[in-house]
Image (cartoon, helix red, strand yellow):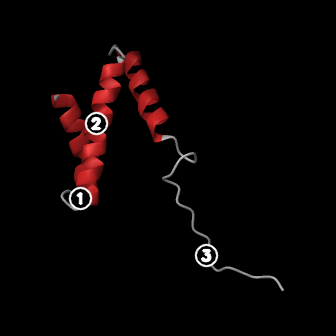
């Protein structure tokens, strides 16, 4: 007997399917192409902001649209 499934769901947000930390680092490295220096401290600072924004989203303090903007505004002003 063969079982058939109507749906098969994957959680694509977990490692190792998508390495978000690597992508963050690569994006900040690209900033060098426009004359901005890459410093490990900058990456750490961005990650702290990003984690806090995601936690605020999970607690329903901000919406996903607010998250997408807020993390970059905080990073820029930091």
Q: Tell me the quarter of the image containing the C terminus.
A: top left
Mark 3: few/some/many CA within 10 Å (<14, 14-19, 20+): few
Instruction: Give the foreground label among 1 and 2.
Output: 2
Comes first in the chain, label 1 or label 3: 3
Looking at the image, which residue is at 24% across and 60% down?
Answer: 59
Q: Are marks 1 and 2 in contact (CB under 8 Å)?
A: no
Picture quadrant where residue 60 is located: bottom left
Q: Residue at x 81, y 82 (%)?
A: 2
Distance (Cα) linking label 1 and label 2: 18 Å
Q: Where is mark 3, residue-wise? A: 7
Q: Position of residue 52 (x, y in %)?
A: 25, 45
Could you give the CA–CA distance between mark 2 and mark 3, rounded to whole angstroms?
36 Å
Q: Secondary structure at mark 3?
A: loop
Q: Residue furthest left?
A: 77
Residue sitting at the far bottom: 1
Which residue is under mark 1? 63
In the foreground, 66 or 61: 61
Give the mark nearest the N terminus, 2 or 3: 3
Q: Is residue 14 above or below residue 48?
A: below
* Residue bearing mark 2: 48
Q: Position of residue 25 (x, y in %)?
A: 43, 28
Q: Is residue 38 above or below residue 75?
A: above
Q: In which quadrant of the rendered view does residue 77 lie?
A: top left
Residue at x-position 30% and y-position 32%: 46
């Amino acid at each position: 007997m063969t079982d058939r499934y109507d749906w098969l769901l994957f959680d694509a947000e977990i490692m190792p399917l998508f390495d978000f930390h690597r992508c963050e680092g690569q994006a900040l490295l690209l900033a060098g192409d426009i004359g901005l220096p890459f410093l490990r401290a900058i990456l750490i600072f961005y990650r702290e902001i990003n984690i806090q924004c995601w936690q605020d989203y999970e607690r329903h303090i901000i919406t996903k649209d607010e998250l997408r903007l807020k993390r970059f505004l905080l990073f820029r002003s930091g």
